[in-house]
Amino acid sequence: MPMDSKKKDRPSGGVGIVEKRFFTFADPPNELELESGERLGPITLAYETYGELNADRSNAILIFHALSGDSHCAGLYTPEDPKPGWWDVMVGPGKGVDTDRFFVICANVIGGCMGSTGPSSIDPKTKKPYGLSFPVISIRDMVAAQHRLIDHLEIDVLHGVIGGSMGGMQALQWTLDYPDRAKSAALLATTARLSPQGIAFDQVGRQAIITDADFNGGDYYDTRPPERGLAVARMIGHITYLSDEAMHEKFGRRLRKKDGGYAYNFDVEFEVESYLEHQGVSFNRRFDANSYLYITKAINYFNPGASHATLTEAFRGVTSKFLVVSFTSDWLYPSYQSKEMARALMAAGAPVSFLELDTPHGHDSFLLENDELSGIVRNFFANV
Amino acid sequence: MPMDSKKKDRPSGGVGIVEKRFFTFADPPNELELESGERLGPITLAYETYGELNADRSNAILIFHALSGDSHCAGLYTPEDPKPGWWDVMVGPGKGVDTDRFFVICANVIGGCMGSTGPSSIDPKTKKPYGLSFPVISIRDMVAAQHRLIDHLEIDVLHGVIGGSMGGMQALQWTLDYPDRAKSAALLATTARLSPQGIAFDQVGRQAIITDADFNGGDYYDTRPPERGLAVARMIGHITYLSDEAMHEKFGRRLRKKDGGYAYNFDVEFEVESYLEHQGVSFNRRFDANSYLYITKAINYFNPGASHATLTEAFRGVTSKFLVVSFTSDWLYPSYQSKEMARALMAAGAPVSFLELDTPHGHDSFLLENDELSGIVRNFFANV
C-alpha cells in the first residue's frame, strides 16, 4: 500500500508535504472501453493520498476535482511551495475532510493535463501527442478510470466520495455505477444535468479555442498553443464562477488607474478587466486547450437521467447516503437543479440531506473557506 | 422638412415602405467636441422618420437604439423586404409608439456601422477607414450628435425620447444634457451604470475581437475581418440577452440530430450551440468588429452619477416625465438597477412611473412583442 504522502511536518495546519504518484493500467489489448464505444489504453492516473488507511481499509474518501482542478487538492509539494492544493481549506487535519480520521485520495481525471492521460499525452501508436485523436470521454469514463485506481489501492468500499461542480457529477456517477462501493456521497454545487445556459457558455469557450488561428486542429504541441482562445474561454468561465453580487463587492466599477478619468482606449481599464486578464494569462501557464475541450464536453454530456423515464428511475438502486449542498448565489449550477437532484434521490429511496447555503460568492462558494460548509461535510462523514 | 418616409402603403399593419436618409454636420473646423476632449468631424448620421410632424412641430418622438441596432426600427425598405425594422412590434400605427399620432425619428449612433460615422468610415484626412484612430466616443457624444439632428429637423421640444438597453442610457442622457428638449422619457431594460458583470462580458467580447489574428490592430478593411472574434463576442452577448428560463424553454438539452445518441466530437451538437453559431455567423454579415469595440466601450463608460455625490444629485434639474420599465428575468440590466435609477429620479423631483414586468425572456424582453409593454408605452406618451 503506497503511503507516499505521509506527512513529515504539517506547516500551517495542512497535510504537509505531499507527492504526486502515478498508476498505469489498461495496457493493450486490455484497454478501457469508453462510453463512446472507443477504447483507451494504456491509461495513467496521477493521484495523491493524504492521511492513513486504517487496518480494515474502510476509512478512504475519494475526492473528485472540477474542470480546472487536479490531483493536488491539499498540502504543499515543497516547503517553499507558495500555494497549497486547490481544496486545502476543506482537506486536512480537523478540516471538513479530516485527514486525521480518513485516508483521502484525489486523482486527476482522464482527459486532463496534470499527469493523467489526456489529449496532450503521447499516443503510443504514433509516438506523438493525441491531440484531437484522443477519444471523447464522459463523466462515466472518468469515474471508471478512478474505479480501477481504487481497486489498485485494494479498497473494497469507500467511506465516501465527494466533489463540487464537475466533481459532484463524478461523485453522483460513482454511486450509480458502483452502488456497493461508497457508503456516502457529498455532492456540492452540482447538478444531474447542466442547463442549456451552462452548455452555451462552454460552447463559446470551445469556439474561442477552436477558431484561434494557432489551434491548428488541436495539433499545436510543437508550435504555438491557442493561448488567446484559451484565455477567452477562461475569462468567460470566471464570470460564471462568480456572482453579480460578488463582482460588485470585489471590483465594483473601480478603475485600475486611480487618477479618476477614463483612458479612452481599449487597454485594460476597469479592475474587473484586470482580474479577467490575469485569469486568462495564468491559466495558459498551467492548462492545455485540448483538455479544456474534452473536459467541458464531458460536463455537457453528463445526464444520467437521459436513458430513463425520470431522474428518480435513473437513481433506483443507489445505496449510498447523500449530502447535497447548493449555494444561493450560484447561477451556473443553480440551487433549483440541486433540489431537483436531491428530490429524485429521495424518491429513489436514498437518505439525503439537502442544504442550501446563503453565500454571495457564486459557484466558487464550494471552493472558498467556509466554516459552515466544512462543519457540514465533517459531520456528514462522521455520521455515515 | 423631410417627410421622406411617408407611407405609400402599409403592409401587415406596419409603417410601410421607409427610406434611410443622411444628415452631415460638424464640418471642420467646426468638429463636434467629444467627452474625451478629441474632436470628430464631419459627422454623418443615418436616420429614418415615420409618421407626420404636426403643424407646431410638437409631436416628435426620438427612438434610441441598442448595441447592435440601427436607424431602421420599423417598416420595410422594399415590398419584398423579408424583415421589418428591429422594433416593428413597438413602432407603427396604433402601436406603443403610435405613428398615427407621433412623428418618429431614429438615427444610427456615431461609432456605428449602419450609415453613421464610425470606425469603418473614411477619415477625410487620410482617405482610409478610421479603424482604431477613430476617437473613443461616449453615450453623451452619441446623444450630442442626435441633438444636432433634432436641431436640423427644426424641432424645439421632443414629445418624448425612448430606448431600451443602451438606448435607455441615451434617453436618460438626453434628459440630463437637454432638460428642456424632451417632455418625457421612457427608459426600458436599462441602467444608470452597467454592473461589473456586464463590463466583464463586454470585455471578454472585445478581447475575442482584439486577439483574433485577423484583427490587425483594427486595420482589416482591405484584408480579412476578425470574423471569429466577432462571432465569439456575439455568442457571449446572446447568452446574456436571454435568460436561464428562456433557454430551457427554447432549447433545453435537445440535440440537433434527432437520432438519440451523442456525436462524440466537437461539432455543433446541442440546439443551443446551433442557435449561437447562427447568431455569430449572421452578425458578421451586418456588423463591423471595430464598431463593436467602440459601442461596448461607450456602454461601459456610461455613469452619469460618477461626477456627483449621489445619483440623485446627478439627476437634479431634469424636467421630463419618466417611465422606467424593467423585466424580472433580465440579469444583464437587472431590475434592482432600474429601481435604483427610478428612485434617484423621484428623489430628484421628477415624476416617475416604474414598472417591473414579469417576463421569462431576459434582457431581450424589451424587443419582443408584448401587448402589455406596448400598452404601457402608448399610455405613457398619450398622457404627457
Image (spheres, coloured by chain):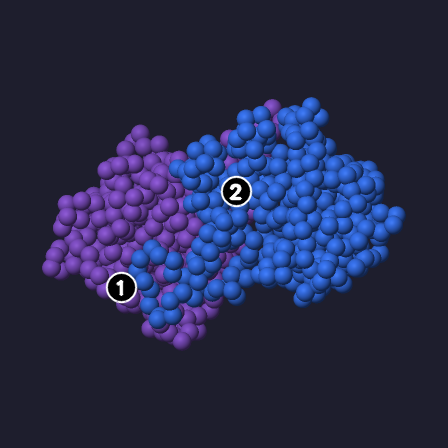
Chain colours: A purple, B blue
* Total numbered labels: 2
Under mark 1, the amino acid is Glu
In the image, is residue A370 above or below residue B359? above
Which structural element holds mark 2?
loop
Residue at 55% x, 29% y is: B127
In the image: residue B212, left or right of residue B178: left
Location of mark 2 (residue): B288
Residue at 39% x, 49% y is: A207
Viewer-side residue, B198 vs B50: B50
Mark 1 and mark 2 residues within 8 Å of each other at the beta carbon: no
In the image, is residue A307 above or below residue B203? below
Residue at 31% x, 39% y is: A225
Q: Chain of mark 1?
A: A
In the image: residue A201, left or right of residue B303: left
Q: How far across and down, in percent of the image, does residue A307 sit? A: 35, 72
Viewer-side residue, A65 vs A224: A224
Under mark 2, the amino acid is Asp
- The answer to which quarter of the image holds residue A252 is top right
Give me the C-alpha separation between circle 1 and circle 2: 43 Å
Q: Are marks 1 and 2 on the same chain?
A: no
Residue at 84% x, 56% y is: B383
Q: Which mark is residue A35?
A: 1
- The answer to which quarter of the image holds residue A129 is top left
Q: Chain of mark 2?
A: B
Q: How far across and down, in percent of the image, does residue A251 sit? A: 55, 37
Q: How far across and down, in percent of the image, does residue A162 sit? A: 36, 56
Which structural element holds mark 1?
loop
Viewer-side residue, B268 vs B325: B268
